Image (tube, grey):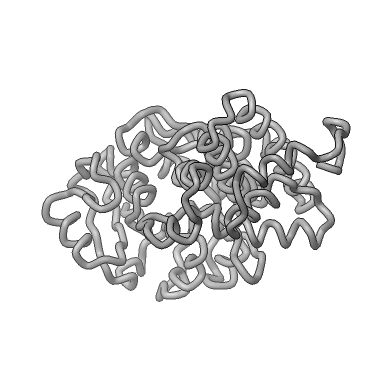
Amino acid sequence: MTIGVLGAGAWGTALAQMLASDGTEVLLWALESELVDEINSVHTNSIYLPSASLAPSIHATGDIKDMAGVETVLVVTPAQHLGSIIGQLSKPPRDLVLCSKGIEAGSGRLMNDVARDACPGADIAVLSGPTFAHEVAAGLPTAVTLACGGRRPQWDRLASQIARPAFRPYYSDDVTGAEIGGAIKNVLAIACGVVDGLQLGQNARAALIARGYAEMLRFGENMGAEAETLAGLCGLGDLVLTCSSTSSRNFSLGKALGEGQSAEALMTDRRTVAEGAHTAPVLKQLAQDRGIAMPIVDAVNAILEGASAGQVVAELLARPLRAERGDEG
């Protein structure tokens, strides 16, 4: 059985490598023709995942039509391009597993809503959790949430296809919660990077993670997510990981912003995508429309728009004192 992976960035390549670790045939779609040639000829991805020597059962293609007939396809494209890319599939697979984390700019839609419109007929699942690509590719132990819109029958199909000795999925039927956790943690990781760049210390970062998690819970529950989901791998677990390491693209972006670099220059120079920068403005707008207090998200937006990181943090610390639990942030 062949499994398809759309997107040959670091995360897509790592997932392909993990799936191919037991000899499974993996069809990996890449946008760059030179990358297709490199993967097929020398079994490396020097652009996005240079640390990995790729399994010979991974075959790359630049033609998305080659995915026709593949029953399970993991979608690992940048979130803002997910709809346009899967809309090119000539035949919907039985299962589309969304591995991109974000909220669509303009529409404010979660990725599962985008996917249902772009590829009707496929059963949608969401794979999310605390994962660094280079560790997954190296076969280090990893646990993730696999949220199945098709519920148990879909889980029964997918779990056996995706699980590996060092890659352990946990079942959920809360697709909304899995998506919201993954999207919001990217924005909060930028905030933690700013704290690191400003050299504000470990106390400040721990406080920001805790208060950011409170914002995640408020927003998620308002959107219909389950608090238990957000307390799991795809929420709190992913938040802790990406808020504490420069291996996170979003954390690295925030750290550079905290050190005084401009958002415009950083976003222009980056080959890889820090999804939190695209999610932050739409998340802020959704929160305002729904009357949800998200002061950390507001602060990240202000910094991305060019405000002084030091001044924004000072204003955040100067907010009126309030109860830790509540809806006021």
Drawn side of residue 250 relative to residue 182, left or right? left
Residue at image x 64%, y 29%? 204
Q: Viewer-proximal residue, 181 or 190? A: 190
Drawn side of residue 326 relative to residue 90, left or right? right
User: Does 297 appear above or below 143?
Assistant: below
Mark yes or no: residue 179 visible.
no
x%, y% of residue 288? 79, 59
Residue at image x 22%, y 67%? 33
Mark yes or no: residue 236 visible.
yes
Drawn side of residue 310 relative to residue 328, left or right? left
Residue at image x 80%, y 62%? 289
Q: Viewer-proximal residue, 262 or 116? A: 262
Q: Viewer-proximal residue, 144 or 193? A: 193
- Locate the C terminus and report the quarter of the image it occupies: top right
Using the rendered view, name the quadrant where residue 248 is placed: top left
Farthest residue, direction top: 203
Drawn side of residue 69 relative to residue 22, left or right? right
Residue at image x 54%, y 72%? 118
x%, y% of residue 181? 63, 45
x%, y% of residue 286? 73, 60
The total of numbered circles placed on residues is 0
User: Does 91 appear above or below 148?
Assistant: below
